[in-house]
């Protein structure tokens, strides 16, 4: 009986050791699998974020090319030169430029809310929206930075139109040289930005992509919450 009891104890002891080893191996395997799964999920989300960033940058580059094309066009440069030098034809050129912005440029891109030209004082001298003419934008970043080169402004709520959008601006120089005449700017809505970020491809049932600005405010829509822009 003592030998049998000893054997049983040995068997139980060996089984206990085996079970402990199995439990440890299982736990380690679980942790390893969990870590691998998290790494894979993080990798997938990073790839999704990168794809949205690439699409966003491509879109903004296209917008910069668009505003630069307007800024270097002969119609705008010739008209603005007459306007800022107070040429006798200035009044006619203002009307001509208003029509050009409204009839020729605005319809090209449905998300363009307004196109306008600023003189060197920062005043709107021509616009696709005549209500804007005469307004001062002297203290705006897109006026100051737009004199130096093509500039993309932050998303903002217009105090005048109550529309949310962003502005891209560029310098306008004379036809005969490098004399700065003013700034041309276009205000866009957020349609394309939202289309890029709310694309659900690769996000499953709960993932989402959105853009946050330097002030920690959301500037594109959320998949799950309403009215989050600039909040």
Image: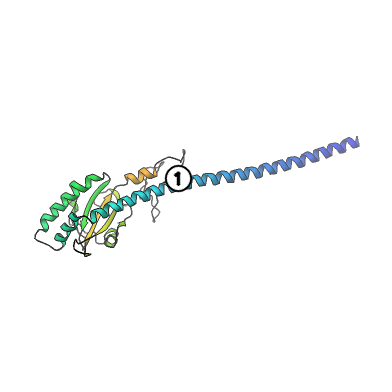
Residue 64 x, y percent position in the rendering: 30, 53
The answer to whether residue 121 is left or right of residue 91 is right
Of residues 159 and 94, which is closer to you in this image? 94
Q: Report the residue at 48% width, 48% height from top.
A: 46
Residue 128 x, y percent position in the rendering: 19, 50
Q: Report the residue at 12% width, 58% height from top.
A: 90
Residue 93 x, y percent position in the rendering: 13, 55
Residue position marked by numbered label 1 in the rendering: 48
Q: Report the residue at 30% width, 49% height from top.
A: 165
Secondary structure beneath dot 1 equals helix
- Quadrant housing residue 74: bottom left
Q: Is residue 158 visible?
A: no
The answer to whether residue 107 is left or right of residue 89 is right
Q: Is residue 171 visible?
A: yes
Q: Which corner quadrant holds the N terminus?
A: top right
Q: Report the residue at 87% width, 38% height from top.
A: 6
């Amino acid at each position: 009986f003592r030998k049998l009891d000893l054997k049983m104890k040995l068997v139980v002891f060996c089984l206990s050791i085996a079970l402990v080893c199995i439990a440890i191996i299982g736990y380690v395997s679980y942790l390893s699998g969990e870590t691998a799964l998290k790494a894979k999920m993080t990798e997938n989300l990073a790839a999704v974020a990168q794809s949205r960033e690439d699409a966003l940058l491509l879109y903004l580059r296209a917008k910069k090319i668009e505003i630069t094309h307007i800024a270097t066009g002969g119609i705008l440069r010739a008209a603005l030169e007459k306007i800022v030098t107070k040429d006798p034809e200035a009044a006619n050129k203002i009307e001509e430029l208003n029509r050009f912005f409204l009839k020729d440029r605005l319809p090209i891109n449905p998300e363009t809310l307004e196109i306008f030209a600023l003189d060197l004082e920062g005043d709107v001298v021509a616009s696709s929206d005549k209500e804007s003419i005469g307004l001062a934008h002297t203290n705006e970043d897109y006026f100051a930075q737009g004199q130096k080169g093509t500039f993309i402004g932050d998303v903002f709520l217009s105090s005048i139109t109550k529309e949310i959008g962003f502005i891209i601006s560029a310098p306008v120089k004379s036809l005969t040289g490098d004399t700065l005449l003013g700034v041309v700017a276009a205000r866009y809505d957020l349609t394309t930005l939202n289309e890029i970020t709310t694309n659900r491809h690769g996000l499953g049932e709960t993932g989402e992509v959105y853009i946050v600005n330097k002030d920690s405010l959301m500037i594109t829509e959320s998949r799950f919450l309403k009215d989050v822009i600039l909040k």
